[in-house]
Image (cartoon, grey):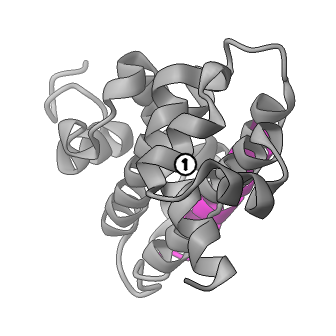
């Protein structure tokens, strides 16, 4: 197996183990889950710290989010665009939060710092989706603030479930509708 494939296999095997054990995971556990020799995992990464670092980098990568956000066609209305963004956010955080939460228990603050940077990048991408909507001029707040609060909803909900994140649990339509139009029925506020 080529080194790049071996690296990917080890990282993908490491993610659920890191989510479960945090920094206490052993390279032996990861190698066994990946179906490679412990020595191979050491050669590919140079040690557990580098492997965990690579796993964090992998899980924080926004490439798939970018692909999903590209589906938010600029001719669509804000509500539709936010639903596409919400799906991308929810799926991304479902992978990220278990890993970052488990690593939050250790002494290494780097995963948390990198997670915060990744969230800022995610918010900027969602702000672009918001600003590109045909009806974006109807917003009462800047697209960056709208994006920050919308991403924050998914982040808060995801942290609430931590290791049990399932993007299907957070219903996109009702959440987006409530976010844009409020919780009260039309005509109920005097």
Q: Quadrant of the N terminus?
A: bottom right
Q: Residue at x 36, y 73 (%)?
A: 77
On whether residue 154 falls in the magenta region, the answer is no
Relative horizontal placement of residue 158, taking residue 114 as reference (left or right): left
On whether residue 118 falls in the magenta region, the answer is yes
Q: How many marks?
A: 1
Q: Out of 81 and 35, give the one closest to the viewer.
A: 35
Q: Out of 151 and 26, give the one closest to the viewer.
A: 26
Q: Residue at x 67, y 23 (%)?
A: 23
> In the rendered image, which residue does mark 1 sit on?
31
Q: Residue at x 73, y 48 (%)?
A: 51
Q: Out of 71 and 38, give the one closest to the viewer.
A: 38
Residue 31, given in percent of the width and then of the height, sits at 54, 48
**Residue interval drawn in magenta:** 116-133
The answer, for residue 186, to whether it is visible in the render is yes
Q: How many residues crowd mark 1 within 10 Å: few (<14), some (14–19), many (20+)? A: many
Residue 136, given in percent of the width and then of the height, sits at 52, 66
């Amino acid at each position: 197996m080529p080194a790049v494939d071996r690296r990917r296999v080890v990282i993908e095997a490491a993610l659920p183990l890191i989510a479960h054990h945090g920094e206490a995971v052993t390279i032996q556990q990861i190698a066994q889950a990946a179906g490679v020799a412990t020595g191979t995992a050491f050669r590919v990464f140079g040690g557990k710290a580098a492997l965990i670092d690579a796993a964090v980098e992998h899980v924080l990568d926004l490439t798939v989010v970018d692909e999903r956000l590209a589906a938010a066609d600029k001719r669509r209305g804000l509500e539709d665009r936010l639903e596409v963004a919400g799906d991308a956010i929810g799926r991304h955080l479902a992978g990220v939060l278990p890993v970052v939460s488990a690593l939050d228990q250790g002494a290494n603050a780097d995963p948390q710092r990198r997670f915060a940077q990744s969230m800022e990048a995610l918010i900027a991408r969602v702000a672009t989706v918001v600003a590109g909507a045909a009806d974006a001029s109807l917003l009462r707040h800047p697209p960056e603030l709208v994006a920050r609060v919308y991403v924050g909803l998914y982040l808060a909900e995801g942290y609430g479930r931590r290791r049990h994140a399932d993007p299907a649990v957070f219903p996109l339509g009702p959440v987006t509708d409530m976010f844009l139009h409020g919780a009260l029925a039309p005509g109920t506020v005097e």
